[in-house]
Image: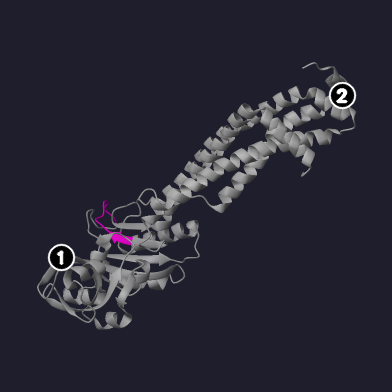
Amino acid sequence: MFDRDIWQEIFHSIKSNKLRTFLTGFSVGWGIFILVMLLASVNGMQNGFYSQFNDDATNSIFIRTGVTSKAYAGFEKERKIQLKNNDVAYIKKSFKKDYEYISARMYRNTSASYKGETGSYQVQAVHPDHQIIEKTIITAGRFINSNDILSGSKVAVIGRKVAEDLFKENSPIGEFVIFNKLPFKVIGIFTDEGDDNAERKIYAPITTYQKIYSNTDNIDGIVLTYNPTYNLTKALEFSTRLENILKRRHKISPEDQSGIRIWNYAEAFSDISSFTSVLSWIGIAVGILILIAGIVGIGNIMVFIIKERTKEIGIRKALGAVPSQIMKLVLLESVFITTLSGFIGLFFATSILALVGPAIQSPAFTNPSVSFTIVLTATIILIVAGLLAGLIPAMKAANIKPIVALRDDK
């Protein structure tokens, strides 16, 4: 493998065919470059898709209601479905092993004021679990707790933008803000990985808002997370069971898609995975086709070189060189050219991605990059490609008969 004479011959052969070696090596390097860049682009698209869900737990399920589109069980169509507190209690009781966290939601708009500063914001009345489901980051104070729920306290957790609007640079913790003429004590400030609009919200205990609105037990929606140990199949099966049972509870036709709407992040991630998998295979196919062109080119070079060195090979065999030695010389030269060219293409691709990738941040395309696995796979592909490119020429060289080679005048 590290025979000095063999490597001297390899370098002499490359030096004698500079242009041909460069052009063929370029096609191999270009093939690897395109392959890595395409796979990085697919990864960037996947990162972009996933980044849009960063502000929620990735195992979230959202339950909302609408108006029925079919008559069912004696009820007419166009009936508005209303979720209630007991729906949350029923899910907790019936799906103990399936769910992780759960919270009801009420949505209300409020006009908030503090010492002359005013603003209009959306209030989400929720349970304590909502903090984990929504991935709400508390930067000061605390989030709503179980005592707030039990007592129906008039407390609020405000977003960073709300704090800036109403309190400027002062601390809002412990201060009272007027929401629609009712005083609420600020107990926390939060940030959100979503956009600025996510930080213009206010969280309050759901029991407090239910008391304010005529002691109702109505809720506008339910959000929960499924068991994190569930795979895609189990996650989708759980949301299907959940939908079927809620439809039965509210007398909705099983075929009605409007009365109860359940959206599972697992389904979105499944669609994204399928889409990016197809793109990855397309990228791999394109890169391999370009690489094959380079392999054929290297194979042609080796055939040409062997033809030029037919007499030399014949002399070697006449002096006692065995076929395996001849094959080793040809294969090493082929693998060297292929691997060196490919590594140059790989180096340029990874360097560009390292410099430019982190700066690319958009909803559809974020930080295109390649993993160590892809780099390792590309390296293995290069070595195998070199072996394939030199295999036929090596076999041809090994089969040259000394007597025929010595008669060759070319």
Q: Which numbered disc covers residue 289?
A: none
Depicted 281 relative to depicted 254: above or below: above
Residue picked out by circle 1: 120
- Disc 1 is placed on an element classified as strand
219 on left or right of 90? left
**Disc number at residue 402?**
2
Left or right: 105 with respect to 332?
Answer: left
Disc 2, SS: helix
Q: Quadrant of residue 404?
A: top right
How is the rendered protein coloured? one colour
Measuring from the top left, give residue 377's x and y in whole percent: 60, 47
> Which stretch appears magenta?
63-72
Identify the residue at horizontal 45%, vertical 50% (top origin). 355
In terms of secondary structure, what is the magenta stretch mainly?
A: loop
The three-letter code of the residue at mark 2 reads: Pro
Regarding residue 211, the answer to whether it shows in the image is yes
Q: Residue at x 32, y 60 (%)?
A: 194
Q: Are marks 1 and 2 in contact (CB under 8 Å)?
A: no
Quadrant housing residue 236: bottom left
Give the vertical position of 102 relative to 297 (above or below).
below
* Foreground pick, 250 / 308: 308
Camera sees residue 274: no
102 lies left or right of 334: left
Q: Is residue 189 above or below residue 60?
A: below
Residue 103, image x, y percentages: 33, 70
Q: Position of residue 225 (x, y in %)?
A: 40, 66
Q: Choose between 138 and 402: the one closer to the eye.
A: 402
Amino acid carrying label 1: it is Ser
Query: Label 2 neighbourhood size at 10 Å, few (<14), some (14-19), many (20+)?
Result: some
Q: Residue at x 43, y 70 (%)?
A: 100
